[in-house]
Every structure is written in C-alpha cells, then in structure tokens.
Image: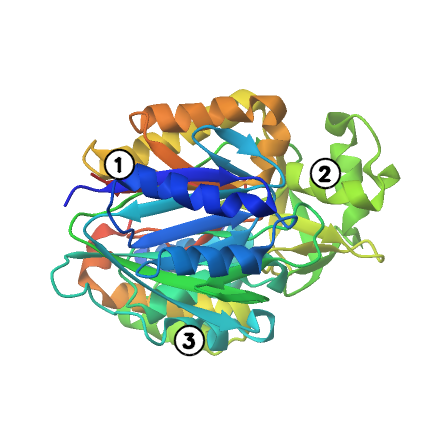
Amino acid sequence: MPTQVATTSISSDDGLASGIDALRDQLGGQSPALVMFFASTSQQMQGLADGLSQAFDGACVLGATTAGEFTEAGDTKGATAVIAVAGDFSVKAGLGENLKDGAEAAVSAAVQSLPLAPEDGFSHRTGVVLLDPLAGNGEEASLLASMMLGGDLPLAGGAAGDDLKMTATHVSVGTQVATNAIAIAVISSKKPLGLGVKHGHHSLSGPLRVTKAEGATVFEINNRPAFDVWAEQTQDAFGQDPRNLSADDVGAFLLTYEAGLAAGAELKIRAPLSKGDDGSLNFACAIPQGAVIRITESESQRQIDAAKAAAEDAMTKVGGDCAGAVVFDCICRNLILGDTFKTAVDGISSALGGVKLAGFETYGEVALDAGDMSGFHNTTTVLLAFPS
Amino acid sequence: MSQRSERGEQLVALFAKTIGEDAALDLVKATCAKLNMSLASVDGDGAVEVLEEISNTEGLIGVTARFAKVRFMLPSASAAAG
C-alpha cells in the first residue's frame, strides 16, 4: 500500500472539523495509522486530542504543546499543525506520567505495552518520543526509552514547548493529555523510516567550567553565578546586557545562546531553559559538576543549511523516495531565523522532494540512531521521513 | 594527558557524548582507580566492570552506563558503533 501523508493547520477552536475534513480529503479514503498534532498553548489540547481520536479511531494519535508549529505551507504561532500518515504501518503508543519524579518509572509505564520486535508482517521498528523537558531528565528518558525497547531501534522525537512561558508543557496519547509526562510510540513498518539530525551552532565563548551543579541545575560557572557568566560572555554578541532583560524575555535569550559540551570532534548542545533567582540556570537535562562547556551561537545561513542537511540525510535513509516527514525543530532556530524560518522549512521540503511535512518548535530534540550514545539534543533539526 | 588503551578511549568517548570530554575523563579515571585498573591498560572485561560500577550511580551518569552496556551487547550495534 503506498504511503499517503496529509497535513493541515488549525488556527481556531472551531477549525478542528474543517481540519479533519482537509486531512480526509488528502488521504483519499485511506485510514491513517498515525496522527500527530502539535498545538500552541492557546489551543485546547484536550479538545484536539478528543476530536482527532474520534475522527480517526483506528489511528494512534499523539500530541504535544509547542513553542511554534509549522507545515510545508509555513510556520504559525498560536495554531495547531497536524500530520496524518496512512500506509503499511502499525503504531502503538503509551504514556508515562510523573516524569520529573523519576525517568525510569515513567518510561517503563509508557513502554509496557509496546512491541519489542516488529509486529507480524513488518520488518522495521522506529520509536517516537514526545516528552516534557521541564522535568529536567530528557537525556535519561531518551536512553531509557531506547534500552527498554531493546536498544536497537532508531528513536526520534521532541521536547514539548509552551510558547516560551517555561511553565508547563503537555503531551498526549489518544485522549489522555498530561503534563510532566512522556509519550512513546513504536511504528512498525515494511520499509525503514529515515532519521536525519543536524545542528548549526558553534562556540562563542572559550572553555568554562561548571563548578557547582545538581541534576539539571547549574549554580556556578568558574565559581561565579551561572547567569552572570552567561550574561558577560554573550553581551557583545547579544547587543545588550542580558541582566536587564524582563522575566518574559529571558527564555528566548537563553535559547539563543546555549551550552556546548565538547564530545569528540563535535559539540553536544545543551539548552538552558530558565534562570533561578540565585543566578542559577535550569537545563533540559543534567549537566554534571566538573563539565567544561562553551556558550554557543549560530547565524541564519548555518541554520538553513543544517535543516537542509538533516533532510538530505533522512532522504538517503529512505532510499530517495519520501512520502512525507515529521520535523522536530528547536525553537532557538526560529528565534535566530525570525522571518526567514519559512526559508528553512522550504529547504527541508525541497530536499525531500516537495512532500508534505509538519512539525513543531521544541525545547529539545530526541534522536538516537545505530551507534549513537546520546539521545537528547538541542538547537537541532530532527527529521523523521516516511518512505513511499 | 595520560595514555589510554583502546577500551579506555571507548569508555571516555561514550560518556563524552552525554557529559562532555572533561567530565567523562574524570569519571572513567576515577572509576578505574577504584577498581584498581589503569585507564592505559583497561581491556574488554575491564570495560564491562567499569560500566557496571558506574551503572550504580544515580541519575544520568548511571543511566548512560546502563545504556552503554546494552549497546555493547548488541552485535549490530557493535558493528555500527564508531
């Protein structure tokens, strides 16, 4: 059965019905195996989960709140992007709650009914993860998900957002919507899906040592309050003293200047999400005390090039024959690109052959392929391509 | 910088992906020392011992060690790992 991918953007509470009609029209009578929706916090997530689950009752419906959402037609704020995939796929999913209390228990709950091998009639498995990054254990959760699913399947996904409020993000499986949670799905397929990953950041500062940290909170860098060091190191590039920013603007600043851990020839990027009153910085996953980091930055063209490279990578993995894609794209890229973000989306779609795609702006990305030893990323484009 | 065996290099590299090179080197050296091993001479069996010891650590580092053990036990992953 050929793969059919449909996308739509829903921008109002009463747009769900017309969005569902649009998806059905595009699917041409095929029933989707997978529906994913990416909703601004200004949308009614429970209503979307209920409506899409009812409309596509044979599909696995997954959702996440966002810091922005897009389809191949363009990016939006305050809307919902939806993608529906029909074809030779079987999808199962589970939800684990209380992620912050312990990644292991939450991941275990999410995977308990998921297949550890491709289902009958299928040859491949791919994992999809949507998680709450405010739990502070994105890397642990990603590695545990891979381990508990057998350790040998590609994993793709994103950390939910909340329009830069840094207050609460939500994910959903079916009609079950939760905060402080993780949604994990396994897609069984007859052909492999294509996973592409790329970031375009480089070092801005010299090496800085984390001198006091606990879990995902960095208290001190070089024995000084972390945010003070961040502000001093980025002030010239940022154009103003970040310590003068309003509370509402700090999140966007931090997501533009992220931390890079030296990991071989590359930088492993870690996103600071918020600052504490004591000058500490809270990250999306643990930064160990003693780690040496560099503050990073990027420019528009590098972001555009990185997104296209991720798409080309994914396209290679589906043998050059792609039907559509889901994109998990760091919000920092949208902050850097601004009005030119559509250019990056166009580059992705073009590299995939002009196909339909939908995605959202995340607070972190999940990508773990064969041989990878780390699953949680930041400032990165992660792309999951569906074969024709 | 002290010398590392091939397995020692691999151990540092796998933790570096998650916690950075400097913290990874400190972690692996300290664990080797605790197990009366040298980073310069740790072999395959020794690497597994190091991973098992680090697996007992709470949080991200312990999970990373457990994940690495799973990867090492998969023939396909071993062939694909760089």
The reply to whether discs 1 and 2 touch (Cβ–Cβ < 8 Å) is no
Q: Nearer the viewer, mark 1 or mark 3?
A: 1
Chain under numbered label 2: A
Q: Can you identify the residue that label 1 sits on?
A: A323
Sequence-first tag of 1 and 3: 3
Residue A74 vertical placement versus A276 (above, below):
above
Q: Are tags 2 and 3 found on a single chain?
A: yes
Three-letter amino acid code at the position of disc 3: Ser
Residue A187: image x %, image y %?
28, 57
Three-letter amino acid code at the position of disc 2: Phe
Q: Nearer the viewer, mark 1 or mark 2?
A: 1
Q: Is residue A203 visible?
A: no
Q: Which mark is residue A108?
A: 3
The reply to whether discs 1 and 3 touch (Cβ–Cβ < 8 Å) is no
Chain under numbered label 1: A
Is residue B77 found left or right of A245 in the rendered image? left
In the rendered image, the residue lying farthest to the right is A244
